[in-house]
Image (cartoon, rainbow, N blue to C red):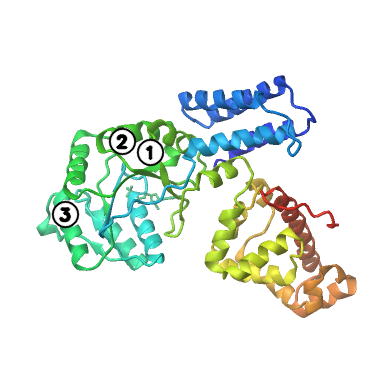
Amino acid sequence: MFDSLSEKLQNVFMRLRGKGRVTEADVNEAVREVRLALLEADVSLPVVRDFIGRIREKALGVEVLESLQPWQQVIDIVYKEMVALLGQQQAPLNVASTPPTIVMLCGLQGTGKTTLAAKLGTFLKKQGHRPLLVACDIYRPAAIKQLQVLGEQAELPVYALPEDQRKGPPTIARMAVEYARQHANDFVILDTAGRLAIDDELMDELGQMRAFVQPHEVILVVDAMVGQDAVNFAEQFHKRLALTGFVMTKLDGDTRGGAALSIRAVTGVPIKFIGTGEKLDAFEPFYPDRMAQRILGMGDILSLIEKAQEAVDEKKAAALEAKLRENRFDFNDLLEQLEQMKKLGPIENLLKLIPGVNNKMLEGMNLDPKVVERRKAIILSMTPQERANPTIINASRRRRIAAGCGQSVHEVNQLLNDFERMRRMMRTLIQQVPGAKPNNKLP
Ligand code: GDP
């Protein structure tokens, strides 16, 4: 996500970092480079102009603080402005005072709307709600079928009218809301029709549906890969439908980031969720601060911990975080983590949430599940002392471990090297996270 933008911005900061003092010329240079990086990422021009203006003004007015290096202050300014650009606070769903809460999803065809209906349903169900998915796209029978298939997969009820009883989408929506009331569904998620381009007929129909059911949320699903055009579509939808929120989908792809960075500033409507993959759990609330940290390479340790907490119990997650901070992470922890990976999904996704980890670092790390199993076998051949204190693993212990798990000494060495590299990387990264205490005792 935003790899190229992220890399460019990090380079700007790296160059500043080398300097003890940051002069006006340095600030100007950095600001120019940030501007270029944003334009190349397809952020809309007026947004870039405003953003850069604010940064320049603040960066030049930086007072010398004892606690922070000047370059750290510049990053801090860019970070705060980016959080503001992205909407400042996480924007929760508007919820009805008397259920059901009605969420109307709109968007062009192929943006990921139907998938999103099921993702949102899954997300709400995990929180103990009883969502009802509603197929309002009567123009493409395949779309109804797709929602039904996804609903089955997510074990969520889907409301759809049989072909011979077809009604107009606004009527279907109203009937579905009535059905939800009768069946104690506290959320109604309306999957509406999409077109390849905006047309009046579609807009009129969506407008009528909005008037019919008065949804608490009118959400536009935006494909992040579309770039600047997405912002234009968003403006047009907003004008006609008075949107209450956006969901950016396909942020897992090689998107430059322009739409995600511009859309809130251009429309004033918040991004509420993001989609990060085709699977139903590839969906999360949008946190402006975390996204800014991710873009600026400050990492996303909060998401990481939260994700770990979903799968692991809270105490374990807290203990793990403390171990990471204090460099006490050992093979017992690694083993536990490898076992948890199954619950957490692909390791790459998780690793990418660690501050500073980028695609380059992941190259060369073998994350194939089969290799993971082999590595588990090596750890299981270690004694408890060896697992807790890897430094005692000398050559003869390595031979014994290799024999114990039926693998070569070379493979054992590889695991030990990778483990050491990982520990070092985590220690460096964790110290960059806000709130981390420097630990001078570390080797
Ligand atoms: P709709 O026409 O707007 O209803 O779009 P669909 O829900 O049918 O999605 C279109 C395609 O995008 C499908 O192949 C989805 O699997 C895929 N898709 C949806 N959301 C995401 C996402 O967040 N990431 C990726 N990579 N693909 C997605």
Dot 1 corresponds to which residue? 269
Can residue 20 be spotted in the picture?
Answer: yes
Q: CA distance from mark 2 to mark 3?
A: 22 Å
Classify residue 199 as left or right of residue 121: left
Dot 3 corresponds to which residue? 174
Indicate the secondary structure of the residue bearing disc 3. helix
Q: Position of residue 212 (x, y in %)?
A: 16, 48
Res 238 label: 2
Q: Position of residue 149 (x, y in %)?
A: 31, 63
Residue at 34% x, 61% y: name it.
Answer: 150
Q: CA distance from mark 1 to mark 3?
A: 26 Å
Indicate the secondary structure of the residue bearing disc 2. helix
* Vertical placement of residue 84 versus 157, above or below: above
Q: Residues within 10 Å of mark 3 (few under 14, many from 20)?
A: some
Q: CA distance from mark 1 to mark 2?
A: 9 Å
Residue at 37% x, 51% y: name it.
Answer: 93
Q: Is mark 1 within 8 Å of ligand 1?
A: no
